[in-house]
Image (tube, rainbow, N blue to C red):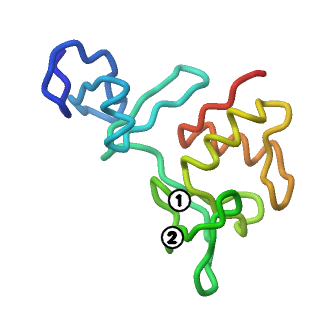
C-alpha cells in the first residue's frame, strides 16, 4: 500500500474509520496526528477519524500542563488532553505519553486527582501507550 502522507510504498497501517481508504506508515501517522490504540484490536485512525475527548472542561485564564508547566491549548485537542475524571488536569500529549512510559500500567494515574481506571481507559482510547511494566 502507498502511504497517504509521504506517498512511499510499504504503508501497513490502515485507518479504521468508516469507509476510510487511508493507509500510512506508523511514523508518518504519528507525525501527522493519527492515533493508534494499544489495546484490544489495536485500531488505528487517520487525522480525520481519530477519537476526540468529550470532556467538558473549562480553563480559567492560561492553563499549564501539569507535567512541563508550559501553556496548553484552550480546549482539548490532539496535542492537549484533559483528565476525564476531574476535568482539571491538562497535559500535552507528549508529556502524558512520557509519564505513561515511565510509570507503566500499575502506577499510571492522573497526577492531580489520582484517578486510575477512568484516566487509563481514556488515555488508552486516545492512543497513549501504557506499557504493562
Q: Residue at x 54, y 37 (%)?
A: 127
Q: Is residue 11 above or below residue 66?
A: above
- The numbered disc on residue 29 is none
Contact (Cβ within 8 Å) of mark 1 with mark 2: yes
* The C terminus, quarter of image: top right
Q: Which of 95/56 is in front?
A: 95
Name the residue furthest bottom. Answer: 61
Q: Is residue 5 above or below residue 79?
A: above
Horizontal and vertical percent position of residue 58: 62, 78
For marks 1 and 2, the one nearer the N-term is 2
- The numbered disc on residue 80 is 1
Left or right: residue 84 compared with residue 53: right
Q: On the image, which quarter does residue 90 sit in? A: bottom right
Q: Residue at x 80, y 42 (%)?
A: 117
Left or right: residue 96 compared with residue 43: right
**Secondary structure beneath disc 1?**
strand
Q: On the image, which quarter does residue 19 sit in? A: top left
Q: CA gap, disc 1 to disc 2?
A: 7 Å
Q: Which of 54/114 is in front?
A: 114
Left or right: residue 25 compared with residue 77: left
Number of labelled discs?
Answer: 2
**Secondary structure beneath disc 2?**
loop
Q: Residues within 10 Å of mark 2 (few under 14, many from 20)?
A: some
Name the residue furthest left. Answer: 7
Left or right: residue 61 compared with residue 9: right
* The N terminus, quarter of image: top left
- The numbered disc on residue 75 is 2
Horizontal and vertical percent position of residue 73: 49, 69
Amino acid at each position: 500500500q502507498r502511504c497517504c502522507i509521504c506517498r512511499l510504498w510499504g504503508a501497513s497501517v490502515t485507518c479504521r474509520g468508516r469507509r476510510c481508504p487511508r493507509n500510512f506508515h506508523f511514523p508518518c501517522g504519528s507525525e501527522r496526528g493519527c492515533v493508534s490504540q494499544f489495546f484490544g484490536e489495536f485500531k488505528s485512525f487517520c487525522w480525520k477519524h481519530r477519537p476526540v475527548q468529550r470532556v467538558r472542561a473549562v480553563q480559567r485564564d492560561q492553563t499549564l500542563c501539569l507535567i512541563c508547566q508550559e501553556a496548553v491549548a484552550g480546549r482539548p485537542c490532539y496535542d492537549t488532553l484533559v483528565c476525564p475524571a476531574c476535568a482539571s488536569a491538562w497535559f500535552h500529549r507528549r508529556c502524558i505519553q512520557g509519564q505513561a512510559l515511565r510509570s507503566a500500567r500499575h502506577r499510571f494515574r492522573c497526577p492531580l486527582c489520582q484517578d486510575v481506571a477512568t484516566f487509563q481507559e481514556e488515555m488508552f482510547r486516545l492512543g497513549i501507550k501504557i506499557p504493562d511494566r
